Amino acid sequence: MGIALFDIIVFPGFIFLGILSLVAEFTDRKLNARLQNRVGPPWYQPLADFIKLSTKETIVPESASSRMFRALPLFALASASTAFLYIPIWSTTSLFPFSCDLIVVLYLLTVPTLTFFLAGWFSSSLYSEIGSIRTMTQLFAYEVPLYMALLGPAILADNWSISGIASYYYIHPLMALFNIPGLLVSLVAAQGKLERAPFDIPDAETEIVGGTFTEYNGRFLAFFRMSIDVELVVVATLIAAVFFPLFTPANAIVGFLIYLVKILFVIFLLAVLRTALARLRIEQMVSFCWRILAPLALLQVLIDLIVKGVLAH
Amino acid sequence: MIVDRIVTWARMKSPWIVHFNSGACNACDIEVLAALTPRYDVERFGILLKGSPRHADVLVCSGPVTLQQKERLKTIYEQMSEPKFVLAVGTCASSAGVFNGCYGVCGGVDTVLPVSAYIPGCPARPEAIIDGVVKLLKSLKK
């Protein structure tokens, strides 16, 4: 009981994940600013934003469904945080590994996107409804390439648990070189998952005000922003665990530093993509995902099948 | 109280703005946009431009309030959540300027909303706008 509470509250629960997500948001914004030749926000900026938003007055629109409006941010934060439990951090096994947890993690990462859709829908404002329809359209476009890109390494490792994949590539590090197309595809698809440029179509502030979060304010908006940051950390950890097989099971402190370097590198790649590319239109995004990303992800699966067949003989 | 001090600190460090044109000639709007460009880099002070008034703390108004815009300005203000501040950018927003007494104009922004800070100038320079926001935030401390 005591250990479970420690897991939920301190590590790897809300306190650890909260600090890590604030660090991730700061890194992302600072890199974005530096790449645009700006100074960028000070280190405490995400914390100040969070405290300010959570102490503001909260307005629930009269036409919105009050119960859903209040509950959805908590669902988003809870499912994004839960996904973190099944991803290995410094050792090759996660806290609670079980077979096929890769699929569970991917579905837990889909739940926040669904809550964004429902949040926009239940706030019953025109802009937020357009935003939520765009969220769903985008979900159908990036989800398939993202899943296939992560299933390729799983096929080669012959294991559908993230801990199993991590320990396979830890023993055979050169095998990770076959997964480079999958890494590229999952980096681009992760931009869609996290709703960042060039795929920030659902909350395009120049077209549809605030997108799905138009009506959200105060602490509910703070929770939604927090859950997007947690999602960023979880996606970076997942990509790092599957595609960068650098673990030190023997030494937790060195392993944790390597883990930080790995996720900051993934966040750096995501920030470069966000800064360098402009927003696409929704139909350009869908056709890009199905015409370019999905075949590349299929190529990844094919490479892994061929390598596995060659190794078997 | 330490909690109050932390909350005041957070409010000072993270002012999100929403920009509203209540009838300006566009000169002040262009200066507001210029203040938001990477050259002045207002994200250093935590200032972000938000599309939705629900997210914003500071309403940046430019121009005299025309009769057409009066109700809309009030609606935008009421959509923001407390604590909220209004910033009048430019001479017209402060006092209606040359449009004072015009048949379609009801005066400066302070005839409709409680204004926290006035930034004079025709148009107000980006440096003046940033200075005004910083002074407004410093006044929160008292």
Image (cartoon, coloured by chain):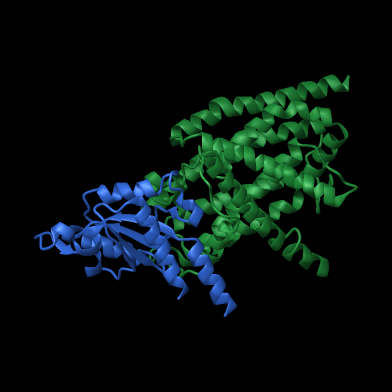
Q: Is residue A33 visible?
A: yes
Colour applied to chain A? green
> In the image, B120: left or right of A94?
left
Q: How far from the left and from the top, in percent, is residue A36?
A: 51, 39
Residue at (85, 51) in percent of width and height: A252
Q: Is residue B39 above or below residue A54?
A: above
Q: The C terminus of chain A is located in which quarter?
A: top right
Where on the picture, by quarter, is residue B16?
bottom left
Q: Is residue A292 above or below residue A7?
A: above
Residue at (44, 33) in percent of width and height: A283
Q: How far from the left and from the top, in percent, is residue A155?
A: 77, 31
Is B58 in front, or is A62? B58
> In the image, B5: left or right of B34?
right
Colour applied to chain B? blue
Residue at (27, 59) in percent of width and height: B120
Name the residue furthest bottom: B1
Is A64 in front, or is A253? A253
Is B27 in front, or is B18? B27
Q: How far from the left and from the top, in percent, is residue A167?
A: 85, 39
Q: Is residue A1 visible?
A: no
Q: How far from the left and from the top, in percent, is residue B52?
A: 39, 55
Name the residue furthest left: B103
Where on the picture, by quarter, is residue A125?
bottom left
Is B140 in front, or is A142? B140
Name the residue furthest right: A250
